[in-house]
Image: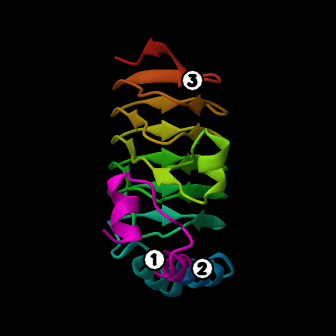
Amino acid sequence: MTELEKMLSGFPYRPSDPELSAMRLRCREILREYNSSSAADSETRKRLLEALFGGLPENLVVEPAFRCDYGANIEFGKNVFVNFNCVVLDCAKVKIGDNAFIGPNVQIYTATHPLDVAARNSGAESALPVEIGGDCWIGGSAVLLPGVKIGSGCVIAAGAVVAKDIPPNSLAAGNPARVKRSLK
C-alpha cells in the first residue's frame, strides 16, 4: 500500500512521504490565495474552493481564514456554513452533512498519534474519520476528536470537546462533551 492508501484506510503511515508532502503543499498554496482573497471576488473564491475540495456543493460558505491538510478528504453537503478560523486536519475523511453550521474557531481532527513514546518518535501516525450529520450546529471553539460521529440534528455547545459519538438530536456540552438533553 502507498502511504496515502494507508492514511485513508486508518493504518499507520508516514506523513513525510513525498506524495503526501506534495499534496499538503498544494493545499497550503490554495489556502494562502483563498485566505488572502477579497470577499468581493466571489468567482476567485469559488474557483479556489472547487480546486481545494474537488467539487463545490450548493451554497457552501467558507469564511477565511480556513486551514486544512489536504482538502480533498473533506466532503460537504449542501447549505453548509463554515465560520472564521476553522481548522480541519483531514488525514482521514471528514463528512459534513447538509445544512450544517460550523462556528468560529472550530477544530476538527482526524490525525492521531501513538501513546507509546518510541512509536510516536518514529514519525508514524494514523487517522480516523469524523462525521457530522445534517442539520447540526457546531458551536464556536468546539473541538471534534478523531473517529467521532455526530448524529443529525445535534447542537454541540461552544467550547465542547467531543471525544465520543453523539446520538442524533442531542445537545452536547462540556469537556469532555456529554449529552445534556434530547432536542426532540
Viewer-closest of 118 and 73: 118
Helix, strand or loop status at disc 3: loop
Location of mark 2 (residue)? 34
Residue type (three-letter) at the residue carrying disc 3: Ala
Q: Quadrant of the N terminus?
A: bottom left
- Point out residue 48 in the picture as x, y percentages from the top left corner: 49, 82
Task: Residue at 66%, 54% (x, y): give it.
Answer: 121
What's the image's color scheme?
A: rainbow
Q: Left or right: 83 with respect to 75?
A: right
Kind of residue at disc 1: Leu
* Mark closer to the chain start, 3 or 1: 1
From the image, tell me which residue sits under label 3: 177
Label 2 and label 3: CA atoms lie apart by 32 Å
Residue 68 magenta-highlighted: no
Above or below for 26 versus 116: below
Q: Which residue lies at the image location 60% right of the left edge and 60% below the top edge?
A: 123
* Residue, far front: 118
Disc 2: CA contacts within 10 A as few (<14), some (14-19) or many (>=20): many
Residue 60: quarter of image? bottom left
Position in image of residue 92 (x %, y %): 41, 56
Marks 3 and 2: in contact by CB < 8 Å? no
Distance between mark 3 and mark 1 Cα atoms: 31 Å
> Amino acid under label 2?
Tyr
Magenta segment range?
1-24
* Residue shown at 46% from the left, 51% from the top: 127
5 within the magenta span: yes
* Among the two numbered marks 2 and 3 on one chain, the one whose residue lies closer to the N terminus: 2
Q: Earlier in the sequence, mark 2 or mark 1?
A: 2
Which residue is under mark 1? 52
Q: Camera-side residue: 58 or 70?
A: 70
Q: Quadrant of the C terminus?
A: top left
